[in-house]
Amino acid sequence: MSELRQNLITRDWVIIATDRAKRPDQFANPKQLVAGLPPHRPDCPFCVGNEEDGTLETFRLCDRTGWKVRAIRNKYPALSPTTERMRISSGIHRTMSGMGVHEVIVEHPRHDLTTALLSIEDVANILFVYRERYLEIRKYPHIETIIIFKNHGESAGTSLEHPHSQIAATPVVPSQVRNRIDEAVRYFDDTGDCLFCRTLEDELAAGERVIFESKHFVAFIPFAALSPFHIWIFPRRHSSSFDDITDPEITDLAYTLKTVLAKLYYGLNNPDYNYSIRSVPTTEQGTKYFHWYVAIIPRVSKQAGFELGSGMFINTALPEESAEFLRSIVIPTSKDLGEIES
Amino acid sequence: MSELRQNLITRDWVIIATDRAKRPDQFANPKQLVAGLPPHRPDCPFCVGNEEDGTLETFRLCDRTGWKVRAIRNKYPALSPTTERMRISSGIHRTMSGMGVHEVIVEHPRHDLTTALLSIEDVANILFVYRERYLEIRKYPHIETIIIFKNHGESAGTSLEHPHSQIAATPVVPSQVRNRIDEAVRYFDDTGDCLFCRTLEDELAAGERVIFESKHFVAFIPFAALSPFHIWIFPRRHSSSFDDITDPEITDLAYTLKTVLAKLYYGLNNPDYNYSIRSVPTTEQGTKYFHWYVAIIPRVSKQAGFELGSGMFINTALPEESAEFLRSIVIPTSKDLGEIES
């Protein structure tokens, strides 16, 4: 018989379908591991030498050899900066101008790399640019929520090969975020504790769902993971918003994120995935009840009518087994791979 | 500039990305329209003659020629019936035995048909069996939510070709459902009206998002549709739960559902889709504030990191344009197609 588990942070009930559970390696990507991409493509807008005229660039991290990471405004933005916020309420309809921010982070000059294969320093550079842009975008008028996210692979919603991620800032608090905050506030009111800190303590005490621990971060599969290999990375230090991250924490998160993504890369054969960095809305910065974190969702299963019709999820992987599997994955060193250190 | 719209029923804010909007026909499925399936497959467990030994069957609708629609227990159920409900609370973890119901509705004896191509009578037969099973499953112990859903096509989460849908009954109210009920109750308390009835009135008055109207039902694209061609079918008569549907309403819903799915079939080249029938939890049956409905989600776009990281959606189709497009689609008659009436 399967088991229902409730995630107290999201309040979602998940069906852990143990009867139809697959072995962890059955979730591996059937496609070729090495995509065989060229290091540079003449027709890629993100490759070195193909940069647009510079009017879209908002930040550039450089060393002596050139840029390492760039932030550019999205050419076809879902939301655009403006000083005016227009809200219209007409009967039961509410409309608002699509104000906000939508930027692309070009993660590396090379076309053929991905976070799992980058050096820790390279990943730290990306996170550094995330923080720079977060701090800047927070100052824009009417911004309420800032979401940093990455789509890796076609089933994760991207068609661009060049490694990149995105930052979007919205003039509203999404209802899903609001519901979770309400829960966190209620838990705080009842116990005086941050629900996320408590979850982290519990996961560390149990140990069986932890994938990787570093000095400042812990990566684990949530007790009620929504889908196979759904992973959360929590900072050990309580902080409600990503832009509060310190320099040593950036290096350490780079180490943790790269390790976890490399375990997915080698363990599940470079699966498509999304990650997002969730922070408290900007107007509630510094709060004691919310804790920022990274969520990674490998796209190894599909949402179907049950999920869409109920908001509940069926997970065909046992979180404890998935975590054990990922713990066991050894990441080859550059030397093993005969790789050129980029 | 894009526009933000709020769906008052779900409270979701959606970004209608008009700047990157595609024309309606650009969402069409690139694959071949006629899948060329055989009417019968010797290896299909749902085809006539291949029925399992009968121990799984819970209902059978027959005429003189044999069965028309069958309900069977899922061979690999996500939830199973039992009389015991075990709930364990340990620290912040909540677990429950996976009790509930998970049945498959085999919609037609023929392997190669789909709802869009069935006769209205055939579709009415399917809906009749939904109601029969709903009424029966409601009596099972500890059932709180019953979801009827269909996965059509691989990207909608099915690998079985034979036309079928599913019924799942859970021993909890999903948090998403609970949040929506809370909103509906609040609206009812504030106004004395059902928010769904009010939405229907508004959509009929505006007209621009209505796709199809029949005597008892209205199909429309919600003002803040989550994704391209996201469709809702509302009963005109206030009722909180699908099992309350009358016989004439079943025939009329069959006509409406078939028409809408056929418009998608011919207009977007047989896209993969999910539909679900949402009712109030069984313990709140008969309530004035909730209204059952059918939601159809064609799988013509992908959720990416932004959606997963925020719960907000970006829709690259303008609801008014999608509705106009679907209104214009003429469904060929069987005679035009030279089809054999099944």
Image: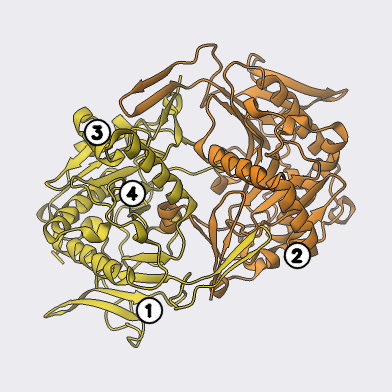
Chain colours: A yellow, B orange
Q: SS for tag 1?
A: loop
From mark 1 to mark 2, how far is it between C-alphas?
A: 42 Å
Q: How crowded is mark 3: few (under 14 residues within 10 Å), some or many (20 or more)?
A: some
- Mark number displayed over residue A203: 3
Q: Which of marks 3 and 1 is nearer the N terminus?
A: 1
Give the amino acid at mark 1.
Asp
Residue B316 is marked as none
The percent position of residue B193, horizontal first and vertical second, equals 72, 45
Q: How crowded is mark 1: few (under 14 residues within 10 Å), some or many (20 or more)?
A: few
Residue A11 vs residue A334, the one in the foreground: A11
Name the mark nearer the viewer: 1 or 2: 2
Mark 3, secondary structure of its residue: helix
Q: Position of residue B43 (x, y in %)?
A: 62, 30
Up-down: is A53 above or below B130?
below
- For mark 4, what is the residue? A296
The type of residue carrying mark 2 is Glu
Residues at marks 3 and 1, CA–CA distance in whole angstroms: 46 Å
Indicate the chain on which mark 1 is placed.
Answer: A
Q: In this view, does B336 lie to the left or right of B275?
A: right
Placement of the C terminus of chain A among the 4 image quadrants: bottom left
Position of residue B321 measured from the top left corner of the image (x, y, whole percent): 69, 68
Look at mark 1 in the image and give the residue it sits on. Answer: A43
Asked if one can make out residue B9 in the rendered structure from this viewpoint, the answer is yes
For disc 2, the marked residue is B208
